[in-house]
Image: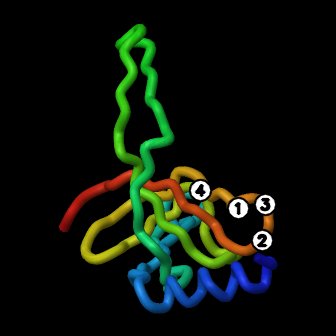
Amino acid sequence: MGLIQQAYTLSQAIEQYGKSAELWRPGKGQYGSPGVPEKVADLKGLFHTSNSYLNVTIQEAGKLSDNKQPMFLILHSSYPKKGDTLKISGHTFTVNTVDDVGMLGICMDLSLTEVDST
């Protein structure tokens, strides 16, 4: 399947099954101090979880914890950056990593950490 067909298929899946989200970025105040967060963009993507990340901590030597990692798959965009805040269906997440899947410039997978559930 060609790249154009893959991009079209993904865009149709996101349009039909995707969730809407708001992308917020921490604002900068005077002298670089934290300011008021600003809304950067409205996104639509596929929310999913991944088991591919294993967390190993020094305090728990030798103990591996296999946690489900929340992810958000979107069409390629210049907006998301590490440290941004993503609000999806009343849940707030922090963007940990932004991965260009396959380095093809078609889609991006955002690795998330849930902040709260208000």
Which residue carries the number 1 mark?
Answer: 100
Which class describes the residues within 10 Å of circle 2: few (<14), some (14-19), or many (20+)? Answer: few
Which class describes the residues within 10 Å of circle 4: few (<14), some (14-19), or many (20+)? Answer: some
Q: Amino acid at mark 4?
A: Lys
Residue at image location 31% in from the left, 55% down from the top:
115
Which mark, residue 82?
4
Q: Amino acid at mark 1?
A: Asp
**Residue 29, horizontal then vertical, whole percent:** 54, 66
Mark 4 or 2: in front is 2
Q: Amino acid at mark 3?
A: Met
- Reply above or below: 30 against 112: below
- Reply above or below: 110 against 44: above
Counting residues from the N terminus, which is met first, the one under dot 4 or under dot 2? 4
Q: CA distance from mark 1 to mark 3?
A: 5 Å
Query: Mark 2–mark 1 contact, CB under 8 Å?
Result: yes
Counting residues from the N terminus, which is met first, the one under dot 4 or under dot 1? 4
| Among the 4 quarters of the image, the one containing residue 21 | bottom left
Which residue carries the number 2 mark?
Answer: 105
| Among the 4 quarters of the image, the one containing residue 19 | bottom left
Q: Secondary structure at mark 2?
A: loop
Which mark, residue 103?
3
Counting residues from the N terminus, which is met first, the one under dot 3 or under dot 4? 4
**Residue 63, horizontal then vertical, whole percent:** 37, 15
Query: Mark 3–mark 2 contact, CB under 8 Å?
Result: yes
